[in-house]
Image: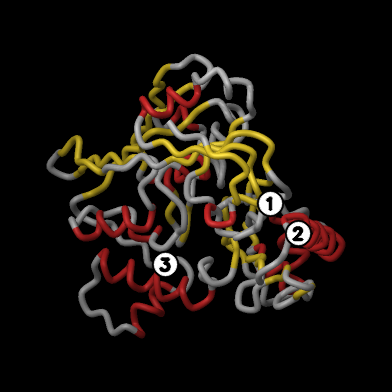
Amino acid sequence: MQILENISLKPYHTFGLNVFTRYFAGFDSLAHLEEILEHPAYQHEKKLILGGGSNILFTGDYDGLILKNNLKGIEVIKETETTISVKAAAGENWHEFVQYCITNGFAGAENLSLIPGNAGASPMQNIGAYGVEIKDIFEGLEAYHIHDKCIVHFNLDECGFGYRESVFKKKFKDQFVILNVTYALRKVPVFHTGYGAIQQELDKMNVQDLSIRAISDAIIKIRSSKLPDPKITGNAGSFFKNPVVSKFRWHVIQEEFKDISAYQVDEMHYKIAAGWLIEKCGWKGYRNADAGCHPLQALVLVNYGNATGMDILNLSEEIIQSVKKKFGITLEREVNII
């Protein structure tokens, strides 16, 4: 077991902020994790489980123990005539897992291509994109309870999935380490091409025979064209959730802004694109020193090199206040603030 001290977290999260942690350790097995957690020198340190670091904003140094989840492995555990259950260890790269599914003809995850992060974070956030969320393909997961020192199984209902929400973000926050996730995929695909510009991109690609590979390729092209690569420009993807408003509020805004970007959730509610709201408030392309709002996608806050976590957080607060003042809507941050 190796516990490192005063380690820079810059390589371990996609914002690329130069923050430090008091203690740092990686684990690649349950036994290794238990050994670290039970070590008397670190039992009383506060702890943070880190996966791909793609949905986190450190506002300063971390005074505790960061545990890097390096669990690996993908296996088919069950198969029927129409479905196939695939278990992925929590440390598996999410996009690589999606590509594994596509290569093997397992349908259902293709719309989630190129989302940064690891498999273990997918149920925590109930990640979603282009009309599909994790809950749509989720079968179950195994997680280690830090206090009770046991493995707990969670099914779909027990995860309490909501819009970018699960029980692991609030009710059970910091209580579990997700070990693996099982996804229920299909042998015969059900294509989702009605969201965003998927069909338009497929047409540009001159796709004649629709396939999960073609949909994945189209989504990769779309995301790559408008979202910054965190290896080049630090960011955590979408910084805010798309707000859900009443039909009356949507109608009031739509009367003044005919180009409103929104879609109907149910009979009484609409979901408005947070990026559209932010852009209408004039933030798209804004930059103050090294903290900014991406010029191609206003929903993405970026670190141009030497921004601090507080620079990013303060910018997000200014954006929240301006959207509230202009539209009467309070944006909610999607990124976890540490």
Q: Residue 50 versus residue 88: which sits nearer the camera? A: 50
Q: Amino acid at mark 3?
A: Gly
Q: Residue at x 36, y 73 (%)?
A: 218
Residue 36, percent from left and from top:
47, 26
Q: Residue at x 55, y 17 (%)?
A: 40
Residue 239, percent from left and from top:
64, 58
Q: Amino acid at mark 2?
A: Ser
Q: For marks 3 and 1, give the CA distance.
A: 26 Å
Q: Amino acid at mark 1?
A: Arg
Q: Residue at x 41, y 21 (%)?
A: 152
Number of residues whose C-alpha sits closer than 10 Å to that of mark 2, classed few (under 14), some (14–19) or many (20 or more): many
Q: Quadrant of the N terminus?
A: top left
Whichever of callouts 2 and 3 sits on the residue coming sooner in the sequence is 3
Q: Residue at x 59, y 34 (%)?
A: 65
Number of residues whose C-alpha sits closer than 10 Å to that of mark 1, classed few (under 14), some (14–19) or many (20 or more): some
Q: For marks 2 and 1, give the CA distance.
A: 8 Å
Whichever of callouts 2 and 1 sits on the residue coming sooner in the sequence is 2
Residue 80, percent from left and from top:
15, 39
Q: Is residue 232 above or below residue 323?
A: below
Q: Quadrant of residue 71?
A: top left
* Residue at disc 1, secondary structure: loop
Q: Is residue 48 above or below residue 313?
A: above
Q: For marks 2 and 3, give the CA distance.
A: 31 Å
Residue 333 tag number: 1
Residue 318, percent from left and from top:
83, 61
**To which residue does mark 3 refer?**
194
Residue 316 tag number: 2
Residue at far top of view: 148
Q: Are marks 2 and 3 in contact (CB under 8 Å)?
A: no
Q: Quadrant of the C terminus?
A: top right
Q: Are marks 2 and 1 in contact (CB under 8 Å)?
A: yes
